C-alpha cells in the first residue's frame, strides 16, 4: 500500500507566485555561475526547481506537497499522467534534489561540476514547466 503524501491546499491562481520565485532563482543561478559562485548557484538551482514544481502542482491540482521529503512532490507530479514528458522531467528534478542536503547542510563546497549538473537539469525543468503554464502577458 502506498503511503499518503500530505498536501496543503492553495488557490490555483497563486501558481504564478511560485513560478516567479522559480524563475528568479533560476536567473540568479545563471548569474552566480558566471561569477563562479558555485554554492549559491547550486542553491538557487535547487530552490528554483522546488518552486517550479510547486507552481506546476498548484496550477494543475491546487495544492503543494506538505511532506518534509521534497521527492514526494515528484511523486505528486507523476499524477500528471496526460503529459508524456513527466517521467523524463521527474528525472531532472530528482537529479537536482539529490544535491540538496549535501549543498545545504554539509561542510563542503559545491564544485563547478556539481553546479553545472544542477544548472543543466534545472534549466531543462524550467523550460518544460514554462510550456505547461499559461503564457504571461
Image (cartoon, grey):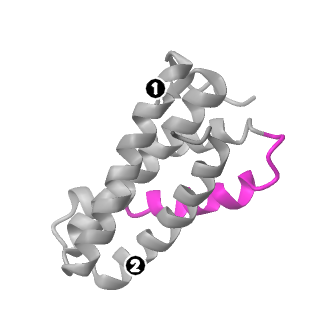
Q: Quadrant of the N terminus?
A: top right
- Magenta residues (range): 81-100
Q: Residue at x 34, y 75 (%)?
A: 115
**Residue 46, how many percent across, how many down?**
38, 56
Camera sees residue 6: no
Pointer 2: what residue? Answer: 116
Instruction: Out of 114 and 16, give the one closest to the viewer.
Output: 16
Q: Earlier in the sequence, mark 2 or mark 1?
A: 1
Q: What's the residue at 30%, 58% (across, down)?
A: 44
Q: Position of residue 97 (x, y in %)?
A: 45, 57
Residue 91 colored magenta? Answer: yes
Looking at the image, residue 117 sits to the left or right of residue 21; the answer is right
Q: Residue at x 64, y 24 (%)?
A: 61
**Is the stretch drawn in magenta largely helix, strand or loop?**
helix
Q: Nearer the viewer, residue 101 or 136?
A: 136
Q: Which residue is mark 1?
A: 66
Amino acid at each position: 500500500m502506498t503511503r499518503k503524501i500530505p498536501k496543503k491546499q492553495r488557490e490555483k491562481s497563486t501558481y504564478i507566485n511560485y513560478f516567479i520565485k522559480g524563475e528568479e532563482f533560476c536567473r540568479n543561478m545563471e548569474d552566480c555561475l558566471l561569477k563562479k559562485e558555485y554554492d549559491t548557484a547550486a542553491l538557487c538551482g535547487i530552490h528554483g526547481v522546488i518552486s517550479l514544481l510547486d507552481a506546476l502542482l498548484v496550477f494543475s491540482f491546487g495544492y503543494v506537497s506538505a511532506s518534509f521529503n521534497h521527492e514526494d512532490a515528484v511523486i505528486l507530479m507523476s499524477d500528471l499522467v496526460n503529459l508524456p514528458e513527466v517521467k523524463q522531467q521527474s528525472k531532472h528534478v530528482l537529479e537536482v534534489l539529490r544535491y540538496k542536503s549535501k549543498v545545504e547542510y554539509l561542510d563542503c563546497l559545491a564544485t563547478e561540476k556539481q553546479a553545472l549538473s544542477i544548472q543543466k537539469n534545472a534549466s531543462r525543468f524550467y523550460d518544460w514547466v514554462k510550456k505547461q503554464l499559461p503564457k504571461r502577458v
